[in-house]
Amino acid sequence: MFARLPCRAFAATLAALKAARLTTGGRYGAAIIAGLGWALAFPRVSIMGLAWLAPALLLLAAVGARTRESLRIGYLAGLTHFLVSLSWLLQIPVRGYPVLGWVALSAFLALFPAVWVMSMTIAARTATHWTSRARWALLGAALWVALEMVQARIWDGFPWNFLGASQYRLLPLIQGASVTGVYGVSFLVVWFSLALFCAGREILLHPTRRYAWLGEIILPATVLALVAGLGLRALREPTDGAESWRVLFVQPSIPQTLIWSPDENQNRFRQLLELTETGLADAPDLVLWPEAAVPNMIRYDESLYRAVTRLAREHRVWMILGCDDAEPRANHTDPDAADYFNAAFLVTPDGELAADYRKNHLVMFGEYLPLARWLPFMRWLTPITGGFTPGTRPASFTLEREPPPASGETTSPNAADAVAEPVRLKVAPLICFEDVFPHGVRRHVEADTDFLVNLTNDGWFGESAAQWQHAASATFRAIENGVPLLRCCNNGLTCWLDARGRWRALFHDETDSVYGPGVFTTTVPRPAAAPATFYRRFGDVFGWSCCAVAALVWRRQIWAAIRRRRHPGLAATG
């Protein structure tokens, strides 16, 4: 009964479209509505059910359209979606750049749904019976995943708000990401959506056949039930080991305008220290400071170095903090020439800088300027005046502490002479939006990695949906790699997630806001021993398989278009 309701809705919409014989303006209006609904599936609105309707709604707007018109319809729907879902870019506190960047990025990303709608409109011409419609729905899901794979990689990649990420709270379903990555969730959502489209079409064409629609959705519905069942079983399995660490998360909530102001460096650093001191009363094992929390370079600023290392020594605590770094360029004619890095440092309880990590994946227009040497006008599109150099490799931070005292009396005469091994913890640091890249995070996780730790500053975007969308995407990195993820953020969302993507603790300030300043200490269990996930071992096998299918389909469609141009009599032009 409930499955039939969306099928009937699609049937009614199809009937209305056919009866009205939509004009171009009418189709464009439908495309805008489809794009808006797609955007509302993501945080902060988070109407997750709209994601299951969005692909079908995109195609409903293009029903009966010619090839070029379907391309324009898909582009308009995509542009609407990205302009709405990425509107937090307008929060960047500089003049001019936010609007230019918002429009330019949205206009570029809209190309992906445009290609998908056009391809599916062409493929629909041969979907005339049940088997061909079933293949068409599977093909649509594969094409969608292939385009997400390209989006994650082209021109440094922007894997933000993938369709599957909208389901981050649907825990039984998204456990499949441990095999396929987030792309498998996107595949299921698109496949079921297109099956609903076909079911609605059958109700419209065969109203007297009571169960005509059922055959269209039975296969994807069965697979969904199977995936959800396996996910429920995975959620019942224990993920926490016997050992745990006390972690202090510090969220300073520094406005981006103050981060850019050298005059405020001392004030904001003093406030950071005071905030941390309040949390150290809980005797944590590890303190986390977010990206950009430290105003100067700890390796070169003596007073800052002394303040941080004194804090670690006095409280016998490990610290991981975000801080800029620099390295002089060897054999350079300018003695002041240096490479600058967005970095994270590990500070020992003895007050030593034990290790560092230099961010590998930089933010385009935020941390570097693409093609700046050849296109100098690009500097007008960004608030930054310089640029960072990317790091070249992942890093691991190893922490140690004394083992807990043994309980009970010792029976061995040599027990007192035995030296217990220290307890070790291995974490993989990430910085900023590195945790939205499925294939990138996988490179950071080794066989003995205990936690992922992300230090980020989303304060660029005020108190907007960016923080929620970022955290929703990051949820999948924990599931894909089978390790907990600790996120320490400047102004939200500071939290930690277990290996199944469950949000185990989320910071709220005294006003119950996730954006304000404050600290919280929580116990984070070390994960129980478990086999490496399929995704961690083999990566995007599923995604690349979808790319192979897409390449074959697009090759055939391009070849058919060339033939039609050369021989117009062979088929009607698009």
Image (tube, rainbow, N blue to C red):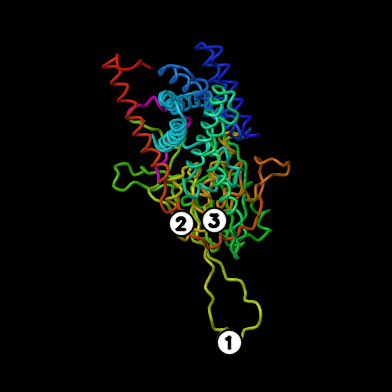
Q: Nearer the viewer, residue 93 or 337?
A: 93
Does any portion of residue 380 appear in the rendered image? no
Please state which amino acid type lies under the numbered disc 1. Ser
Sooner in the amino-acid sequence: mark 1 or mark 3:
3
Question: Would you place residue 568 above or below residue 380 in this image?
Answer: above
Under circle 3, the secondary element is helix
Q: Nearer the viewer, residue 269 or 82?
A: 82
Horizontal and vertical percent position of residue 429: 49, 52
Q: CA distance from mark 1 to mark 3?
A: 45 Å
Name the dominant secondary structure of the magenta segment. Answer: loop
- Numbered circle sitting on residue 90: none
Q: Nearer the viewer, residue 79 or 209?
A: 209
Examine the image and state in which quarter residue 156 appears: top left
Please state which amino acid type lies under the numbered disc 2. Ser
The answer to the question of whether label 1 and label 3 lie on touching residues, with beta carbons closer than 8 A, is: no
The answer to the question of whether label 3 and label 2 lie on touching residues, with beta carbons closer than 8 A, is: no
Examine the image and state in which quarter residue 395 appears: bottom left
**Which portion, as a residue range, is magenta?**
374-390
Q: Which residue is mark 3?
A: 306
Q: Which residue is mark 1?
A: 412
Does any portion of residue 506 appear in the rendered image? yes
